[in-house]
Amino acid sequence: MMRILHILDHSAPLHSGYTFRTLAILGQQRRMGWQTIQLTSAKQGPSAAEQDIDGWHFFRTPPDPRWWARLPVLRQISVIAGLARRLHQVAQTARPHVLHAHSPSLNAIAALRVGRALDIPVVYEIRAFWEDAAADHGTSPSGGLRYRLSRALETYVLRRVDAVTTICEGLRSDIIARGIAAPHVTVIPNAVDSGRFRSAPPPNRVLARRLGLQNNVVLGFIGSFYAYEGLALLLQAMPRMLATAPTLQLLLVGGGPQEPELLALADRLGLRDRVSFAGRAPHDQIGEFYSLIDILVYPRLPMRLTELVTPLKPLEAMAQGRLVVASDVGGHREMIEHGRTGMLFAAGKADALAGQVLHLVRHPELWPALRQQARAYVEQERSWSGSVARYGEIYQRLLAPAS
């Protein structure tokens, strides 16, 4: 039985797109008959040395308690050193065939140290360039010293690991542009469990009444409230849409750093009776929120992160047979074909967003075909069984005897 030791930034019980992808990969690898071992870095936070979460066993790395380990740069060095020590312990016991490190590069550096010491091949999976995420979250300026150091570390790792995987073609192109040989880089795309997301259940009328939703066309967004998601643009487009379709309502499900600004913007625009903020929803209840929404809107703004990285949420919506309107950033164009599986609009343009939504509102006869084609795309191209199966060839190639 193939044994894969996954090295992670964080995991359940924390909730994020990162943790959801991780659990999907682990679950599918187990169904394929492989044994998985899971280790998180100190960035998981204080916890027991080992934890069982929803049937998954995680090894943990304790944070460094020394005061200097909280300082910039030294903090990252401490994370790598602590993770390498803990990984060496776990690997000696579990005896994995492959070390599979997931973003960020700190995890891959620790994996390289242990892999070389124990003669175990290392796979590195890039889910996003974390320097771009930091820049777009406003925690580190683009092009600054921290940005350049982080980018240099990524490139350093990419040139030394035994194989590279990533989540989309945009990231793969960027990796190859750094001088990494194309056959060395494999796309393992984001996907969904199409069996779990068969279709949205009938609308939950009790939930609809609680949220103040009536029998009108409901627009919606489900996800994290970061600036790059473009939710402010969606709110700014609402008055334009309401001028033509005055019964439209908007449901925002989730939370994040932009929530206070969005609440204030809705007040300034006089939209509080048209916009419902539902807060964060448990993952097992997401289907009920999808059932209330006719058109999911994903207005991501044009920037390096959104041009390169494909999000997961639009795939969930498409799997549930929901209509999708999204900005035409690169990450969306990889998944959505305009007029066939969804509608695209010029990124960053409130008028363009409003135009595509109103086009769908005026033409409900288009809805059945769009929904059916989106669902078929997910089933045929974006199932986790098909996506995760791609790891098999990579692992087998690394474990094959040298000729």
Image (cartoon, grey):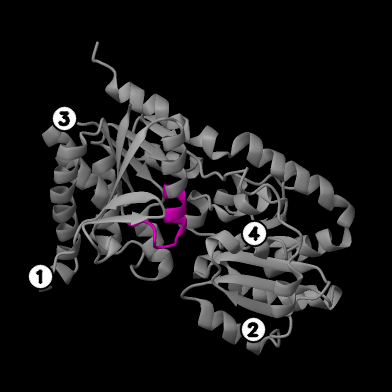
Residue 130, image x, y percentages: 36, 56
Residue 263, image x, y percentages: 58, 83
Q: Mark 3 or mark 4: name the one nearer the start of the chain.
A: 3
- Distance from the alpha carbon under mark 4 to that under mark 1: 44 Å
Question: Of circles 3 and 4, which is in front?
Answer: 4
Task: Work out which quarter of the rendered image holds the C terminus and state it.
Answer: top left
Q: Name which residue type carries label 1.
A: Arg
Q: Mark 4 or mark 2: name the one nearer the start of the chain.
A: 2
State which region is magenta: 10-22
Q: Name which residue type carries label 3.
A: Asp
133 left or right, relative to 274: left
Q: Which mark is residue 119?
A: 3
Residue 8 visible within the image: yes
Q: Which mark is residue 287?
A: 4
Residue to which mark 1 is pinned:
66
Residue 345 visible within the image: no
Q: Which mark is residue 266?
A: 2
Residue 354, quarter of the rendered image: bottom right
Q: Does residue 29 belong to the magenta stretch?
A: no
Residue 16, image x, y percentages: 45, 60
Up/down of 384 relative to 310, above or below: above
Residue 351, quarter of the rendered image: bottom right
Up/down of 30 relative to 12, above or below: above
- Distance from the alpha carbon under mark 3 to that under mark 4: 45 Å
- Distance from the alpha carbon under mark 3 to that under mark 1: 32 Å
- Distance from the alpha carbon under mark 2 to that under mark 3: 57 Å
